C-alpha cells in the first residue's frame, strides 16, 4: 500500500492544500518561498508553480476564484485561466490585517483577522465588517455566519442569536435550515432549527467534540469526538446512533454521499460508515501509508469521495468509496503528464487496476502492468502472466519482456545488467539461458515473434541482439529490427545488414545515410527512415521499391497496415506519407514542440491517431482526410482506434470518450470513477444501437444482475441511543 499511496509532493513540508470543487485540480503550498503548486489530480500532471503571492501561507480554491493569504495580507484572484492550463491569474482585490482561517465559497468569502469581513467572491467587494474573532463560520449560501458566539445575518449584519460560549465548531446544513455548534471543550452540541426558531441541546459524546458535518441532503448530522466516537443524528426522526470507530487520534470526518461517511486519523488510516435508519455499519480499518516521518498528518476531503492525506513531504490521493489511488504527484516537477490509463486488448488499466472495456467494471486481481499486449501481475514470489505463473528467482526479480507466444520470459536483476530467460513447456517453467555480462543497462527489451531472439538498446544509439539458443550477443552501433526469421542492423555509416536467425550475414546494403528507424510490415516489407529520407525495400533488401525526401523528422512509425508512414517533425508538426506511392498525404498538421515528450501515435481499423495534451489528430487512411478532436481539459492519457473507424479516448480525469461518424462526434462518455457505471461494447467493437450508461449489468434475459457481495463491510449495527431532548426553545429572529 505504501508504494501506491505515498508519494513526494514537491515540498519538504506541505503547509496547506485545496481541491477545486470539481475535483480535477489540486493546489499545494509548501514553505513560504516555494510558491503554489497546481496539479491535475487523476493524471498527476503538474500544471506549474505560481508565485503571485509572496510569502504564501494558506489558500482556498473555488471553481474560478483563488483566495490566498500570508503575513497579514490576503488576495482574491480570478483563476479562470486555470481551465485552459494557464497560471496567469488576475488580481481582483487585496486586503490587510488578515490571519488564518479564511473561507471561500461560490458567492461569498470570509476573511478572519483583526476585522472579520464578508465579501463577494465575484467582485471582491467587502459587504460586511464585524469585530475580529478567532473562530468564524460561513453558511454555504452566505445568508448566515457564525462569528465568535454570535449568529449573524449575512445580509444585514445584525445579530440573530447569541450563544452562551464561543462556537469553536459550527456546521450549516446545505439549505441553511439547520445549524449545529459546540464550544472548544464541549462534549454536547446545540442544534438549531432556523426555520422553526427552535434549538436543542444534545449530549452527543462523553469527550470533546472535534468535527460536525451535515449530510449532503441535510437529513443527518454527524459528530466526532477526540476519542474516535461517532454519533449520527437523524433529523427527521430525532433518533441518534453511536459507533466507536476504533481509530487513534481522529482528525477527519466527511460525507461521501447521502448515506456514507468516512472517519480518518492522523496516520492516514480511515473507516467507512454506512448510515441507515436502523443504524450504522462500519468497514474494516484501511491502514494508513507507512512513512518514516513522525507526527500527525492532515486530511483534505474533496468532492465525490476524493480525499488527500499529507504528512511532511508525503501526499496521497484516493477515491475513498472504492479505495482506488487516483494520482501520484511527482517530485521534482515534470513537464510531461504521466499516463495513468492504457488499453491492452479489451482491458483498460486505470492506475494499474484492470477495467473490463466490455462492461466498464473494475476487475479483481489488480494492479497489473502491461508488457506489450500481455498483462502481468506480481503475486508474492510469482508473476502471473496470462493464465500461468512464473516463480521469481531471488537474483532476477524484474520481468522485462514476454514473447507473443507466452513461452519465453526475460528477467533482469535490480541493477538491470544481468539477464536471464525462462521458458515454459507443457508441464513446468524453467530457467533456460543466462546472458553474458552486459556493458550497460538494457532498454526496451523485446522478443522476436517466435521467441528465439531478444533485442534491446543502450539509450545512446547502440543496439544488441541476443540469440539465447547459442548464447551469443551481436552488438551494433545503430538501430536493429527483429524479423520473423532474423534481423536487420544499421551502422552509423548507413550500411544495413540482413542476418538470419543464427546470426549469419545474408546481405549487406551500403549507404551514405545514417538510418534512425528501421520499420517492418508484412504487407509492405521494410522501410528505412532517416530524418530527411525514407526508402521502402522488400524483406530481403534486394529490391528498392521507392524512396522519398522528408522535411526533417525526430520520430517515425508505420501504420498498422504498413501502408502509411507517420513522421514527427522537429517543429512539432506531424505528417502522413504513403509508403506504396512515396508521397505525402496532405499537409502536415501542427502540434506544439512542447507536446513532443508525451506525443502518442497509434493506428488501426483504417485510422491513424496522434494524441498530445488536449488535442487528438485523426487521419482516415483510405483518403488521407484529417480531423481534430479537441477538449478544453483534461489531458488525454491514451487514444485508440476501434472497428468501424471509431475512436476511444482515455482522459486523465478517469473517463472514456467514444467518438465516431463523419465528422467525428462524441457518442458516449463514462467515468471510471463512477463505481457503479457500466459501458457496453458488443462483439468486434460494435456499440449498442443507442450507447448509454448503465447503473447495473443487464443479464441476457433483461433482468438486473444481483449486486456483488461487499467483503469490506462488517456486521456492526448500532442501536438507537437517545432521542433529542428539547431544551427550552429560544426564538431567534430569522435572518
Image: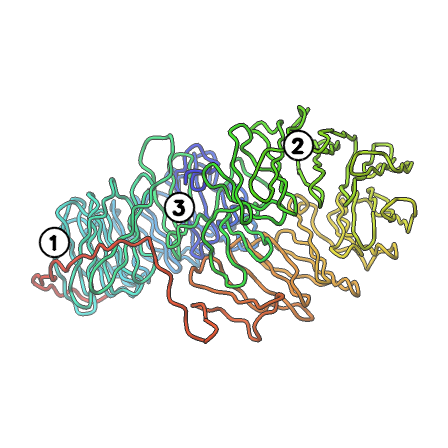
Where in the figure is residue 496, as x and y percent of width and height? 86, 37
For mark 3, does the 10 Å Cα neighbourhood hold few (<14), some (14 to 19), or many (20 or more) residues? many
Residue 633 visible in rendering: no
Where in the figure is residue 67, as x and y percent of width and height? 42, 49
Count of numbered tags: 3
Q: Which residue is mark 1?
A: 203
Q: Which residue is mark 2?
A: 442
Residue 557 visible in rendering: yes
Label 3: element kind: strand
Mark 1 or mark 2, which is nearer to you? 2
Distance from label 2 to label 3 (Cα)?
A: 37 Å
Q: Nearer the viewer, residue 628 or 563?
A: 563
* Left or right, 547 with reference to 380: right
Specify which label sits upstream in the sequence, 1 or 2: 1
Q: Nearer the viewer, residue 154 or 398?
A: 398
Q: Which residue is mark 3?
A: 308
Image quarter where the C terminus lies is: bottom left
**Corner quadrant of residue 687:** bottom right
Residue located 17% across and 67% down the image: 237
Image quarter where the N terminus lies is: top left
* Left or right, 149 with reference to 712: left
Specify which label sits upstream in the sequence, 2 or 3: 3
* Left or right, 274 with reference to 36: left
Amino acid at each position: 500500500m505504501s508504494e501506491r499511496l505515498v508519494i513526494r509532493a514537491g515540498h519538504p513540508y506541505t503547509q496547506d492544500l485545496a481541491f477545486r470543487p470539481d475535483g480535477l485540480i489540486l493546489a499545494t503550498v509548501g514553505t513560504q518561498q516555494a510558491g503554489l503548486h497546481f496539479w491535475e489530480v487523476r493524471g498527476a500532471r503538474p500544471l506549474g508553480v505560481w508565485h503571485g503571492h509572496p510569502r504564501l501561507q494558506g489558500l482556498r480554491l473555488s471553481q474560478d476564484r483563488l483566495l490566498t493569504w500570508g503575513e497579514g495580507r490576503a488576495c482574491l484572484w480570478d483563476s479562470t485561466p486555470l481551465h485552459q492550463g494557464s497560471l496567469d491569474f488576475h488580481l481582483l482585490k487585496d486586503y490587510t490585517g488578515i490571519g488564518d482561517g479564511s473561507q471561500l465559497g461560490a458567492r461569498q468569502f470570509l476573511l478572519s483577522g483583526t476585522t472579520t469581513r464578508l465579501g463577494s467572491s465575484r467582485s471582491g467587494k467587502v459587504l460586511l465588517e464585524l469585530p475580529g474573532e478567532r473562530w468564524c463560520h460561513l453558511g454555504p449560501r452566505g445568508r448566515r455566519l457564525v462569528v465568535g458566539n454570535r449568529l449573524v445575518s449575512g445580509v444585514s449584519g445584525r445579530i440573530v442569536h447569541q450563544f452562551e460560549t464561543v462556537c469553536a465548531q459550527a456546521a450549516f446544513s446545505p439549505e441553511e435550515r439547520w445549524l449545529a455548534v459546540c464550544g472548544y471543550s464541549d462534549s454536547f452540541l446545540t442544534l438549531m432549527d432556523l426555520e422553526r426558531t427552535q434549538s436543542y441541546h444534545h449530549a452527543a459524546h462523553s469527550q470533546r467534540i472535534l468535527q460536525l458535518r451535515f449530510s449532503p441532503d441535510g437529513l443527518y448530522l454527524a459528530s466526532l469526538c477526540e476519542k474516535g466516537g461517532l454519533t449520527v443524528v437523524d433529523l427527521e426522526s430525532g433518533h441518534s446512533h453511536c459507533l466507536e470507530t476504533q481509530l487513534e487520534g481522529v482528525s477527519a470526518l466527511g460525507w461521501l454521499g447521502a448515506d456514507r461517511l468516512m472517519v480518518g486519523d492522523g496516520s492516514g488510516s480511515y473507516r467507512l460508515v454506512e448510515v441507515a435508519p436502523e443504524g450504522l455499519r462500519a468497514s474494516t480499518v484501511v491502514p494508513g501509508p507507512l512513512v518514516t516521518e513522525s507526527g500527525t498528518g492532515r486530511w483534505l476531503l474533496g468532492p465525490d469521495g476524493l480525499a488527500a492525506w499529507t504528512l511532511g513531504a508525503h501526499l496521497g490521493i484516493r477515491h475513498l468509496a472504492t479505495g482506488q489511488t487516483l494520482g501520484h504527484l511527482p517530485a521534482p516537477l515534470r513537464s510531461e503528464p504521466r499516463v495513468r490509463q492504457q488499453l491492452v486488448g479489451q482491458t483498460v488499466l486505470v492506475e494499474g487496476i484492470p477495467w473490463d472495456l466490455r462492461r466498464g467494471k473494475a476487475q479483481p486481481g489488480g494492479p497489473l502492468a502491461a508488457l506489450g499486449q500481455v498483462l502481468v501481475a506480481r503475486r508474492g514470489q510469482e508473476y502471473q502472466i496470462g493464465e500461468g505463473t512464473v516463480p521469481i528467482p531471488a537474483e532476477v526479480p524484474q520481468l522485462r519482456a514476454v514473447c507473443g507466444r507466452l513461452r519465453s520470459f526475460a528477467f533482469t536483476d535490480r541493477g538491470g545488467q544481468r539477464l536471464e530467460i525462462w521458458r515454459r513447456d507443457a508441464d513446468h517453467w524453467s530457467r533456460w539461458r543466462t546472458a553474458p555480462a552486459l556493458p550497460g543497462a538494457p532498454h526496451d527489451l523485446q522478443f522476436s515473434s517466435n521467441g528465439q531472439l531478444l533485442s534491446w538498446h543502450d539509450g545512446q544509439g547502440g543496439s544488441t541482439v541476443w540469440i539465447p539458443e547459442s548464447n551469443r550477443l551481436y552488438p551494433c552501433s545503430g538501430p536493429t529490427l527483429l524479423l520473423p526469421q532474423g534481423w536487420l542492423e544499421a551502422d552509423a555509416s548507413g550500411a544495413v545488414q540482413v542476418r538470419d536467425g543464427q546470426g549469419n550475414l545474408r546481405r549487406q546494403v551500403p549507404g551514405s545515410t545514417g538510418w534512425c528507424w528501421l520499420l517492418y510490415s508484412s504487407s509492405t516489407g521494410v522501410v528505412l527512415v532517416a530524418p530527411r529520407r525514407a526508402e521502402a525495400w522488400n524483406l530481403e533488401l534486394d529490391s528498392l521499391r521507392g524512396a522519398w525526401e522528408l522535411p526533417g523528422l525526430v520520430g517515425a512509425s508505420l501504420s498498422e497496415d504498413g501502408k502509411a508512414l507517420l513522421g514527427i517533425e522537429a517543429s512539432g508538426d506531424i505528417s502522413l506519407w504513403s509508403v506504396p506511392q512515396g508521397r505525402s498525404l496532405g499537409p502536415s498538421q501542427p502540434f506544439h514542440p512542447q507536446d513532443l515528450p508525451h506525443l502518442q501515435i497509434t493506428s488501426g481499423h483504417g485510422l491513424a491517431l496522434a494524441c498530445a495534451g488536449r488535442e487528438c489528430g485523426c487521419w482516415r487512411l483510405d483518403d488521407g482526410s484529417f480531423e481534430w478532436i479537441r477538449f478544453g481539459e483534461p489531458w488525454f492519457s491514451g487514444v485508440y482506434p476501434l472497428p468501424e473507424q471509431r475512436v476511444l479516448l482515455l482522459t486523465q480525469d478517469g473517463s472514456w470518450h467514444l467518438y465516431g461518424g463523419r465528422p467525428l462526434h462524441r457518442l458516449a462518455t463514462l467515468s471510471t470513477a463512477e463505481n457503479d457505471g457500466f459501458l457496453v461494447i458488443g462483439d468486434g467493437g460494435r456499440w449498442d444501437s443507442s450507447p448509454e450508461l448503465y447503473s447495473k449489468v443487464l443479464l441476457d434475459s433483461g433482468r438486473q444482475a444481483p449486486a456483488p457481495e461487499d467483503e469490506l463491510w462488517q456486521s456492526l449495527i448500532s442501536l438507537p441511543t437517545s432521542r433529542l431532548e428539547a431544551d427550552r426553545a429560544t426564538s431567534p429572529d430569522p435572518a
